[in-house]
Amino acid sequence: MKKIIITTLSLSFLASNVFAGCMKSEIKQLDAKLSNTELAESKKAEIKKLRDLVVANEHENSELAFESYEKAISLLN
């Protein structure tokens, strides 16, 4: 019984670490596009706020994070 509990806890821990940073590539993409684009400072500030929302909510509220990411990408294009 102890082995089953320890195995279950270990697998839960490993699974939680596998999904950490799930929007890491999207955040890097925003950073790269933001540094390579020439936009007005007001638009850059808005995109930076959206990027911060993505970072803050990527684990707690992934739907809001993804919506913020999509809006930021649309402003960059």
Image (cartoon, grey):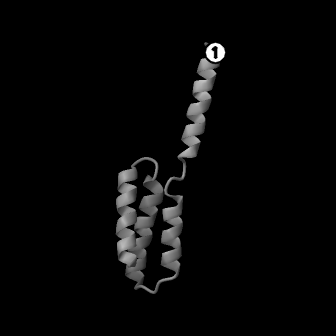
Q: Quadrant of the N terminus?
A: top right
Residue 37, how many percent across, how many down? Answer: 47, 83
Q: Nearer the viewer, residue 19 or 43?
A: 19
Task: Choose between 20 and 54: the one closer to the eye.
Answer: 20
Q: Which residue is at 63% across, 15% downward?
A: 2
**Relative height, residue 43 to residue 13 (above, below):** below
Badge 1 crowding class, 10 Å Cα cut-off, few under 14, some 14 to 19, many 20 or more, is: few
Q: Residue at x 46, y 55 (%)?
A: 56
Camera-nearest residue between 77 and 61: 77
Instruction: Report the residue at 46% width, 48% height from top.
Output: 59
In the image, residue 77 sits, relative to residue 51, either above or below, namely below
Which residue carries the number 1 mark? 2
Is residue 68 toward the left or the right of residue 15 in the image? left
- Secondary structure beneath dot 1 equals helix
Q: Which percent across, then down, holds residue 72?
A: 39, 70
The C terminus: image quadrant: bottom left
Q: Residue at x 35, y 73 (%)?
A: 74
Q: How many marks?
A: 1
Drawn side of residue 34 relative to residue 1, left or right: left
14 left or right, relative to 48: right
**Splitting the image into 4 quarters, where does residue 7 fall?**
top right
In the picture as drawn, the residue positioned furthest to the top comes out as: 1
Q: Residue 47 occupies which quadrant of the picture?
A: bottom left
The amino acid pointed to by label 1 is: Lys
